[in-house]
Image (cartoon, helix red, strand yellow):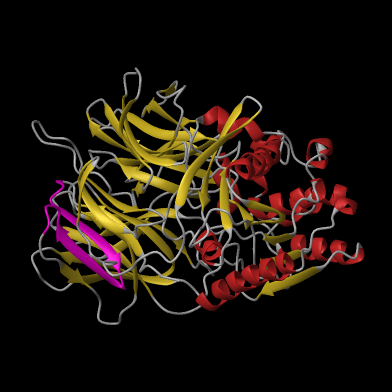
Amino acid sequence: MPKATKIDEVALSPDGSQVAYIVKGEIAVVPAGGGSSSTVSVASKLELRDLAWSADGKRLAFIADLPGDVPAAQVWIASMDGGDPVKHAELKGYVQTPRFSPDGTKLALLFIEGMPRVAGPLEPMTPLAGVIDEKVYEQRISILDLATDHLTQVTPADVYVYEYEWTPDGEGWAVSAAQGAGDAQWYVARLYFANAKTGAMREIYKPKLQIAEPRVSFDGKNVAFIEGLMSDEGSTGGDIYVVPITGGAARNLTPRIKSSPSALAWTGPERITFAQDVDGNSGFGSVSSKGGAAETLWTGEETAAPAGDGWVSSRSFSGEKLITGVVRQSASVPPEVWVGAIGNWKQISNVHSEIKPGWGEMRNVNWMNGSTRVQGWLMLPKDFAPGKTYPLVVNVHGGPSSACMSRWEERFMSAQSAMGYFALCPNPRGSYGQGEAFTQANVKDFGGGDFRDIMAGIDALSKKYPIDQKRIGIRGHSYGGYMTMWAETQTERFAAAVAGAGLSDWLSYYGLNDIDEWMIPFFGASVYDDPAVYRKSDPIQFLKNVKTPTLILVGDRDGEVPMPQSVEWYHALETMMVPTQLVVYESEGHHFYRDADRRDYMLRTLRWFEEWFGKVN
């Protein structure tokens, strides 16, 4: 299968004249108008990440991870005058999100001192052993004085900071933060102003749901952010709000928008520009902080998305166009860096000029489930020929607050297509792309309307495409793993199933996972306070209906959906004499990081469908 080289980030200089991105372990810096690139690297070839420009565009900060099982990192700054990059700090613990102060004399960082693992719920959890204490590692904003290289931890020791942005006067930051363990408390984070000298924090806004992307206006008087029903930190969607930095009522600027904003930036004194998912397509829009209808700037079936915080020039100067930097790709075009005015980008990188797709055409499809319009992506079998029937594999995305889009790295769908299958990735209710009401439409209804949306898609597409009705499979990871387990309790239509990091038993899951706060917005209460609302969506309650041969895959250090959920489903299916197999990947978390494990996961999945499709008469 054609494999693309990963382009990790795109960071545009504030004046829009230069763009930096990371590829093949080096930082490439290219004029935004095109031209020859220069490279920034460190002698030891460490893994580089988290690019950040100074306000004047003359310096570029980045993080270099040191090798080893326990996180440690160096903080580097490269000058654009051509000199060698300079190391300013080496820190034991997890470091991320460097940001220059407005005057350029300091560099703020998010730092978890002594953290024994990489931060985040998707990472492999530290195994429990011995007496379990309640030690909590808090992520704090720290300031690195660039004249002395002295590091000071500023925000309180009992508060976990998730995101932040400097105020224009350099006196503080707008931050999203919460007290307690970072992985779980993100779901109840609030918006604060933090004083850069004292660390004192003043609450600005308590949201009803989850928040992300706090951004301070040019005059420092307002903070814009995204609030919505989000199931995973980093998977952002919702409505755009603005609130005074002194506190007060927050105003929803996009209350009826039929899309899901995912990133935003102030691009004028009263103007906010944002990236969004629009019915499975990529898009950009603009809205006034004073109110009024949002304006659509561009939409396209290919994904043109920010790949980092610095995706837009700092402001649109009089008579000049706003410059943006994005990674642009689709299922048929590999990713490259593009820079320019929105919708009028110019390709800057040329990493994948020789790569061509080895799979079939991807189509944006939609169907109706009663009065609900549902969208998804269907990849045709490679060398598709009318007059012949083909198997179908349904790939349910994670989340549920997420969405399938047209990207080059749709590994499972492209592999299924290459094997001669149709591959469908539906965006049922609960997904991003059709507005916040659609995203919230599966609240207290997991496995209800969302499952019916998926099944309606299979029915609708079966009328338009030559799908072999005896050879339909389903797979997914996380929420997709849950939906796979649920689906096989509700129908015998699937010939084979693959459940990755699936959730089989809500009662036991609630007591095992590391992020239990995520369930409250979706179910309204804990499983202990309202077991009935969980029971009706619980696969284990309907176990005896299962007949589908099921492959179960999971990492042994998964904190989001712990391994025992997969073990429980495996044991249950074995007891019911359903053909099943369980594979546990050592030292992997919710997401897999070893290339060998990802490859094994893929191959086992494909072989499972091949085996059981082959047994259908």
Question: Which residue is farthest front?
Answer: 387
Location of the C terminus (image quadrant): bottom right
Image coords of residue 73 (percent x, y): 38, 71
- The foreground one among 154 and 425 is 425
Work out whether residue 210 or residue 277 is closer to the camera in this orientation and state it: 277
Query: Farthest residue in the bottom direction?
Result: 44
**Quadrant location of the N terminus?**
bottom left
Residue 105 in sight here: yes
Give the magenta part as a residue range. 15-34
Q: Main secondary structure of the magenta part?
A: strand
Picture residue at 42% right of the left edge, 79% below the top: 67
Is residue 206 in view from this perspective? no
Query: Percent x, y for residue 370?
Result: 66, 27
Residue 530: quadrant of the picture: top right
Question: How many numbered markers are drawn?
Answer: 0
Relative vertical location of residue 418 with respect to residue 191 in this rendering, above or below: below
459 over 152 or under it: above or below: above
Of the pair 547 and 616, the residue shown nearer to us:
616
Q: In the figure, residue 219 lies in which quadrant?
A: top left
Determine if the magenta segment contains residue 435.
no
Q: Answer left or right for 107 relative to 596.
A: left
At horizontal 87% and vertical 67% (from top left) the residue drawn is 574
Residue 421, given in percent of the width and then of the height, sits at 58, 60
Q: Image point 69% across, 35% down: which residue?
A: 449
Picture coordinates of residue 272, whole percent (x, y):
30, 31
Nearer to the camera, 468 or 451: 468
Which residue: 16% across, 47% down? Answer: 16
Residue 21 is a magenta residue: yes
